[in-house]
Image (cartoon, rainbow, N blue to C red):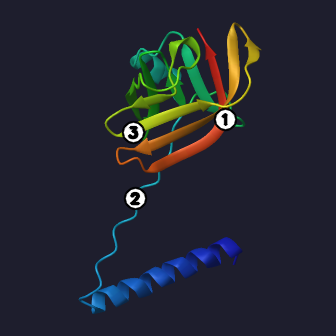
Amino acid sequence: MSKNCSGAIRIAVSGLVMGAVAACSSNVPEAAEPEAEFTLQPIRYPEIESNDIYGPGCRFRLDNGGLSALAMTRAEDAFIRVDGTVFPLGVDLTSEKAPLGTREIYRGQQYQMALDLTGEEMASGGGRTEYTATLRITDAENSLLYEQPGIAQCGV
């Protein structure tokens, strides 16, 4: 058995023991269900087309994650894709300015996004510029759901 599996079994067994203790004691509250895992999905051409995500802006991708954008920003809005759904986010006009009229922070009803351009500007060809960046996604209660370094490619 691998180290990872034995750790998972230990966690499962300890969870069963805790559940049994909670069931036998009227003073111990039930544990809350764990939140579902948060996974950003690439925004593909069908989503770009159906949500009309064209024009100048920045696209965030993982440094080693291929060319697919996990977030897209424009001057007036931004987009992320979670569980097959594209979520539009409105611009926070009080946040720091970024290239091409974009901003650092965008907010929606369920999610907030911060795209922090941390690196020096690097030309990437075709009139585009790349920056080392960090993408952060929080929920409506401001709990961190996602934080990853990557590349922001900005252009028309």
Where residue 37 is drawn, which disc sits there? none
Which circle's residue, 2 or 3, is located before the other in the chain?
A: 2
Residue type pointed to by label 1? Gly
Which residue is nearer to you in this view: 111 or 64?
111
Where in the figure is residue 105, as x and y percent of width and height?
Answer: 47, 30
Which residue is nearer to you in this view: 37 or 148?
148
Residue type pointed to by label 3? Tyr
Residue at the far left: name it: 26
Q: Residue at x 58, y 23 (%)?
A: 59
> What is the CA distance from the residue labelled 1 to the residue labelled 2?
25 Å
Secondary-structure class at tag 3? strand
Please name the residue that numbered disc 3 is placed on.
111
Instruction: Using residue 105 as the reference point, say whether residue 130 is left or right of it.
Output: right
Which circle's residue, 1 or 2, is located before the other in the chain?
A: 2
Which circle's residue, 1 or 3, is located before the other in the chain?
A: 3
Please name the residue that numbered disc 1 is placed on.
150
> What is the CA distance from the residue labelled 2 to the residue labelled 3?
15 Å
Q: Nearer the viewer, mark 1 or mark 2?
A: 1
Give the quadrant of residue 98.
top right
Q: Is residue 99 above or below residue 90?
A: above
Query: How many residues crowd mark 3 within 10 Å: few (<14), some (14–19), many (20+)?
Result: many
Secondary-structure class at tag 1? strand
Query: How many residues crowd mark 2 within 10 Å: few (<14), some (14–19), many (20+)?
Result: few
Locate the C terminus and report the quarter of the image it occupies: top right
Please name the residue that numbered disc 2 is placed on.
35
Give the quadrant of residue 5.
bottom right
Q: Residue at x 56, y 12 (%)?
A: 100
